[in-house]
Image: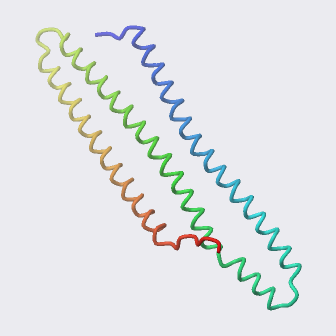
Amino acid sequence: MALTPEQILSAHKANIETVFGLTAKAFEGVEKLIELNVNASRAALAEAAAHSQALAAAKDVQELVNLQTAYFQPLAEKATAYNRHIFNIASNTSAELQKALEDKAGQYQQSFNGLVEATAKNAPAGSETAVAMMKSAVSAANNAFESVQKAVKQASDMAEANIKAVTTAAPAPKGKA
């Protein structure tokens, strides 16, 4: 069974839409990271300017030490919050891309299996053994693909759980009083 030009064109259009859809999702993640970095830079610059002015207005050494201590103390909490934001953006983007890829892989697998079945039905008489071997090979490949997909998912879930455990163990940012 040969594919018609319409089927080939339709598959090509679907592939292009998939690539551009995945690219758009990736760019959304990059945009979120850029926005986070711009906001963090803007906040750091404003804090540094305010801190510099406060240092310039310090009347004695003790006030200078207190200002420095007050400025540097929350930096670890801010870094933790920043890393949490990065992790959330990355994991959400990754989850969206993974879901889209899994959906597409399932569609391709179904299409390929349909093509194999159609080819098997139209096979000439006496080729039953070759058809059976082809079906067996396709089935083995599908099983191997599913096993690899499950292993990757488990590894991804484990890595995500470990990262969440680390960020959960870190102190949460304290609200300003």
Q: Is residue 97 left or right of residue 116?
A: right
Q: Does residue 67 sit above or below 18 in this rendering?
A: below
In the rendered image, which quarter contains the N terminus? Answer: top left
The residue positioned 45% from the left and 13% from the top of the image is 9
Residue 143 versus residue 15: which sits nearer the camera?
15
Q: Is residue 86 left or right of residue 152?
A: right
Measured as percent of width and height from the top left, residue 46 is found at: 78, 64
The residue positioned 26% from the left and 34% from the top of the image is 142
The residue positioned 65% from the left and 74% from the top of the image is 177
Measured as percent of width and height from the top left, residue 136 is found at: 17, 29
Q: Does residue 175 sit above or below 32 in this rendering?
A: below
Q: Quadrant of residue 123?
A: top left
Residue 154 versus residue 147: which sits nearer the camera?
154
Badge count = 0
Q: Residue furthest front?
A: 177
Q: Quadrant of residue 44?
A: bottom right
The residue positioned 50% from the left and 72% from the top of the image is 170
Residue 38 versus residue 132: which sits nearer the camera?
38
Q: Is residue 41 left or right of residue 111?
A: right
Q: Tell me which colouring the rendered structure shows.
A: rainbow
Residue 88 versus residue 19: which sits nearer the camera?
88
Measured as percent of width and height from the top left, residue 154 is found at: 33, 53
Measured as percent of width and height from the top left, residue 99 is found at: 40, 40
Q: Quadrant of residue 69?
A: bottom right
